[in-house]
Amino acid sequence: MNAWISFTFVACLFAASAETASNLVCYYDSSSYTREGLGKLLNTELEVGAQFCTHLVYGYAGIRGENLQAYSLNENLDIYKHQFSEVTSLKRKYPHLQVLLSVGGDHDIDVDHPNKYIELLEGEKVRQIGFIRSAYDLVKTYGFDGLDLAYQFPKNKPRKVHGDLGTAWKSIKKLFTGDFVVDPQAALHKEQFTAFVRDVKDSLRADGFLLSLTVLPNVNSTWYFDIPALNGLVDFVNLAAFDFLTPARNPDEADYSAPIYHPDASKDRLVHLNADFQVDYWLKQGFPSTKLNLGVATYGNAWKLTRDSGLDGVPVVPATKGAAPEGFQSQKPGLLSYAEICGKLSNPNNQYLKGNDSPLRRIADPTKKFGGIAYRPEDGQITEGLWVSYDDPDAASNKASYVRVKNLGGVALFDLSYDDFRGQCTADKYPILRAIKYRL
Ligand SMILES: *[C@@H]1O[C@H](CO)[C@@H](O)[C@H](O)[C@H]1NC(C)=O
């Protein structure tokens, strides 16, 4: 009898702990609908992926420069072609799915109002109310389950590369001049953001709408998030813990762009540029682990190599030359979707190709801590050297294991359209999404 009770008790505990890491928050970047060619993600393919997700985050709405109200960044698609409604209607078929509308991200670029996110925080209450009403209206009108704020804050300055001689002096100078300060008003903006989120939350409460935050890459949580205060206001937080180094920000050196742990202190790397540091920071501030989702990217950051970058591909790779040319599918310089990276690795179709068409070599990561690397050095016939840091399904699965060990809420995947949604690589559609799902 007693043994039976304790067996049941243990079984329940096990069931409870197995249930904690259950969120799979999938970002859907609707600009993938308008991409040309194989990168175009249509709704039938979206649906295949959405079945695996607990939440779908529709990206992105923006803030209108003139009046600071929330609005669709592509009304033709979202509203006239009914994409908002089509996507939220997936819930009818998959009742476990919750669909949120995300405002911000790195898509809402407005040269006339580059500072509008900060202006909204600093602005008068009536302007904030205008934003909050318009955001609420979008959520309500198109059948979303809630709102995600992928709020644009000034980003960390990238690490500068300089000769050995200058390094010591510059780091001393930095201590005195505060070279890393990107926003002298950060403390104020942090306070304003908390108040703003409180008002947003109030507007959503009556309908029971969800509110989540996306912490964008290279936005410093210490400066902008009052974590203890936000805890009571948001349902969960998605930490975009990737793009720590990118060819746009770090053109002269290539490194792991989304390691779980700090790779190697001897190479002068900054200690906070890894997922574990970011997660720990939120946990140390008392944020509940089960409300924190670790962001995983489905694309890689790709640098152009030069002859001076060497042949071994081991990061930190010196003398790179910014972004590698755009992929046919990604259509963004320096960015390759997982499907594209996979296609460049050695396979029966390309293994005998030479020169600039030769396959990439892989550097394995037996530690499971840093993610994958594939590269082709500039050498002999090869004049277009390439080095890419990315998470393949195994690396993504390692991150899901990390999430379980840390008892986090789950994984946030950025985004569905860069996973191999057509199954071009191994005939498995959405291999990264699946790998995470199986591990969680
Ligand atoms: C924010 O930046 C400071 C200064 O570079 C750094 O010490 C701190 O660890 C950063 N915080 C996070 C959460 O990355």
Image (spheres, grey):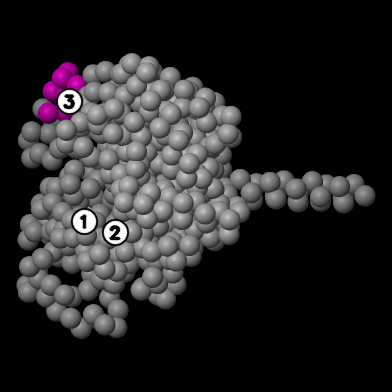
Nearest to the observer: residue 12 or residue 227: 227
Residue 245: image location, x then y, percent: 25, 45
Residue ID at (31%, 34%): 63
Residue under label 3: 179
Please, what secondary structure does the residue beneath circle 3 have? loop
Q: Which residue is mark 2?
A: 34
127 up-or-down from 354: above or below: above
Q: Residue at the spot x=12%, y=34% of the render? A: 167
Marks 2 and 1, how far apart at CA: 14 Å
Residue 215 in the image: x percent, y percent? 38, 37
Q: Residue at x 29, y 37 (%)?
A: 218
Q: Looking at the image, which residue is at 22% across and 60% down? A: 331
Task: State the image coordinates of residue 431 (x, y, percent, origin top left).
Answer: 43, 66
Residue 196 higher or lower than 300, as above or below: above
Element marked by disc 1: loop
Residue at far right of view: 1
